[in-house]
Each structure stands twice: as structure tokens, then as C-alpha cells.
Image (cartoon, rainbow, N blue to C red):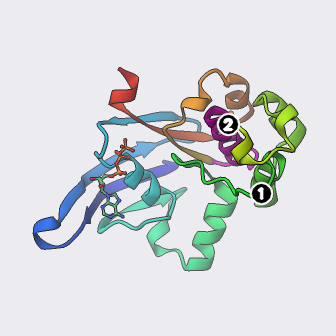
Amino acid sequence: MFLEINNIRKSFGESENRIEVLKGINLDIERGEFCVLLGPSGSGKSTLLNIIGGIDSPDAGYISIDGEKTGEMKEKKLTLYRRRHLGYIFQMYNLIPNLTIRENIEVGAYLSEKPLDIKDMLQTLGLYEHQHKLPNQLSGGQQQRTAIGRALIKNPDILLCDEPTGLCGLHKNISLLRGSLHFCSRSSKSIS
Ligand SMILES: Nc1ncnc2c1ncn2[C@@H]1O[C@H](COP(=O)(O)OP(=O)(O)OP(=O)(O)O)[C@@H](O)[C@H]1O
């Protein structure tokens, strides 16, 4: 099993403000599988992705990648795991405002040992003619495709996508990543 999500529990807040968000999530995902996580707004999809991505930690349970538990990795190893194996498309894009579109995508390439080609990526995403602009000069969809490019160019083993509506119609990119694991979250509301 490549990715094992075992009995993950997570709460936020204290005493009467405490909310139990993840109540024992179990999921096994093989290499190359495409998995979509559906649930109403506030049900904990981003929280689970953050835990898989090593950005947040669970109260109980564990995540195991290729037989290794992320909770048992030392900080340096966890950083390397995120850098080398993980692509994360954030819901809020998280682009660097004073870097151009090309530079924002290149950040992903610098973090990878096996990056894809920047020119191909810009062309596939329809961003080639916008490459020298800053994020605030682009539409929301173009900004999201920049965030997608930054994650895809790493050619990661695991691609975590939080509400990746911009991935629709980008099948060429998906085939570039054949063999990787894709794990996406979408609110059920946005699907209906
Ligand atoms: N750092 C935090 N501190 C306190 N509460 C939090 C924190 N992060 C998330 N929550 C709460 O946990 C719940 C789950 O949030 P989460 O962002 O995981 O939901 P989601 O399913 O991704 O929602 P959406 O589809 O709207 O993006 C929400 O009630 C949210 O308010």
C-alpha cells in the first residue's frame, strides 16, 4: 500500500468550543490511484489534506507513505518528504506576489530532483503569454493554474489538490503525471 491513512482523528478548540472534525478516517490508496474526497463545506477535507501533507498533525492515528509513518519522521526528513514527493495545490493558491508567473512555477521546479519542462508547463496551462506578469495582473482561474503548474512541475509522487477546479480540461497534465497518486478534495456543494 503506497498511502495508508489509519484511524486519523483531529479536533480544534477547547472545552465547549471543541469541535471534532475527523473522527477516525481510514483509507488505503495505491500508487497511480486517483481519489476524490467529497464532503460539505467545513467537514474536514482541507484538514485531512494538511495532515497527509505533513502541514498539520493528527491527534491520533497515522499516515504512512510507502511504509514509512510521517509522524515518526524527524523535522528534516519531513521537510525532504514534502519537498521531494509532494505537490500541493492550495485552495487559496498561495502564490508569491512579487514573483512573476514563470518564477512562481519555477519555485516548484527548484524543489524537485526530476522537474518537468517549464516551457511545456506554461504552454499546457495556457500561461505562456502571461509568464512575465505578476499574480495580481491575472484572473482567478489563471492564478489557480499557476498554482497547479507550481505543484505539477515537481512531477511529484503524490499530488494533493484542494478544490482544484482549474484542473478540469487539463488532461494533458494528468497524463504527464501518470504513475503518480492524485488526491483531490471538492465540496459536494460545488459538484451539484
Ligand atoms: N486551525 C483551525 N483552528 C480551528 N478550527 C479549524 C482550524 N482549521 C479548520 N478548522 C475548523 O475545522 C472544520 C473543518 O475545516 P476544513 O477547512 O478542513 O473544512 P473543508 O471540508 O475543507 O471546508 P471547505 O469545503 O469549505 O473548504 C471547520 O469547522 C473549520 O472551522
Q: Nearer the viewer, residue 46 or 53?
A: 46
Q: What element carries label 1?
A: helix
Amino acid under disc 2: Arg
The location of residue 87, given as percent across then percent down, is 63, 50
Q: Quadrant of residue 127?
A: top right
Marks 1 and 2 in Cβ contact (< 8 Å): no
Locate the C terminus and report the quarter of the image it occupies. top left
Identify the residue at horizontal 66%, vertical 53% (top origin): 95
Label 1 within 8 A of ligand 1 by Cβ: no
Q: Is residue 154 left or right of residue 63?
A: right
* Vertical side of 36 occupied by 108: above or below: below
Q: In this view, does 102 lie to the left or right of 61?
A: right
- Distance from the alpha carbon under mark 1 to that under mark 2: 14 Å
The location of residue 182, given as percent across then percent down, is 56, 39
Which region of the structure is painted magenta?
Answer: 139-157
* Vertical side of 53 occupied by 155: above or below: above
Q: Indicate which disc residue 145 carries.
A: 2
Query: Residue placed farthest to the left in the image?
Result: 16
Q: How many labels does the image show?
A: 2
Identify the residue at horizontal 26%, vertical 65% (top origin): 12
Identify the residue at horizontal 52%, vertical 49% (top origin): 2
The location of residue 10, given as percent across then percent down, is 28, 62
Going from N to C along the chain, the mark reached first, 1 or 2, is: 1
Q: Residues within 10 Å of mark 2 (few under 14, many from 20)?
A: many
